[in-house]
Amino acid sequence: MTARKAVAALLVPLVLAGCATSNAVLGRPVEVRQAGANPKDPVRGELIAVGPDKMWVAGPGNVRAIPRGAVQEVRVQRHGLTRGKALRWVALGILVSTIVLSAACSSVEDADGCGTIAVPVGLTWGLIGVPSAMSLGNSSHLQVQPAQWDSLNGYARFPQGLPEGVDPGALVPLKTPAAER
């Protein structure tokens, strides 16, 4: 098997695995802190829709309508790539790159000092990857105040608002999201 075929045999399944996702459109996981409620007990669940006077959040077993006036703060989980996960990917990139480069250099005759290229490649991974991972960790959640109410629409299952004639109580969460801290 040629090197080109080997690379293709490894990459094709990885690319195709990314295509095997659900067709379900979900709202983002949220934590809603309500004025006057215990701050340690926010409403958690999937953001279903945001209307002019209330929002609907699907938690385990029910959909709750929360009036706009009762909302103190909403925390939206924008993506699941946390700082820790991103740092693990950086470490894996450094490890795999150095191993592969060292193996490639050892297979070449008269390649004096070829293995030293692994050090600058590993440093490059670290210099680019670590700050990127830190930035990703800061962007995974968005805190929205009541004055920014309209900015929540894009994170809802129904970004245009609850469709007319839809009973929010009949909606069930397609998954049970838990907003990560």
Image (cartoon, rainbow, N blue to C red):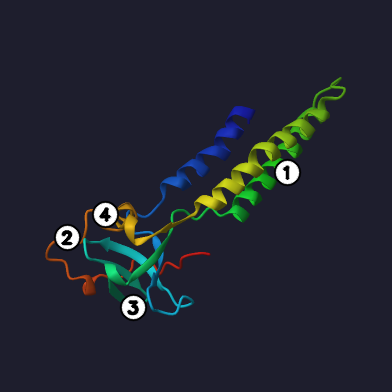
Badge number at residue 163: 2
Q: Which mark is residue 159?
A: 4
Badge 1 marks a residue whose secondary structure is helix
Could you give the CA–CA distance between mark 2 and mark 1, rounded to whole angstroms? 50 Å
Sequence-first disc among 2 and 3: 3
Disc 2 from disc 4: Cα separation: 10 Å
Which residue is drawn at the image coordinates 59% and 33% (left, top)?
7
Q: Amino acid at mark 3?
A: Gly
**Quadrant where the N terminus is found in the figure:** top right
Determine whether the residue tagged by mark 3 lies in a helix, strand or loop: loop
Could you give the CA–CA distance between mark 3 and mark 1, rounded to whole angstroms? 44 Å
Q: Are marks 1 and 4 in contact (CB under 8 Å)?
A: no
Local crowd size for mark 2, using a 10 Å CA cut-off: few (<14), some (14–19), many (≥20): few
Mark 3 or 1, closer to the camera: 3
Amino acid type for the residue under numbered disc 4? Pro
* Helix, strand or loop under label 2: loop
Compute the Cα span from label 4 to label 3: 22 Å
Residue 61 marker: 3
Can you say whether 129 is above or below 147 in the image?
above
Amino acid type, callout 2: Pro
Q: Which residue is mark 1?
A: 95
Secondary structure beneath disc 4? loop
Would you place residue 181 above or below residue 151 in this image?
below
Q: Residue at x 46, y 43 (%)?
A: 16
Of circles 4 and 3, the one toward us is 4
Image mark for residue 64: none
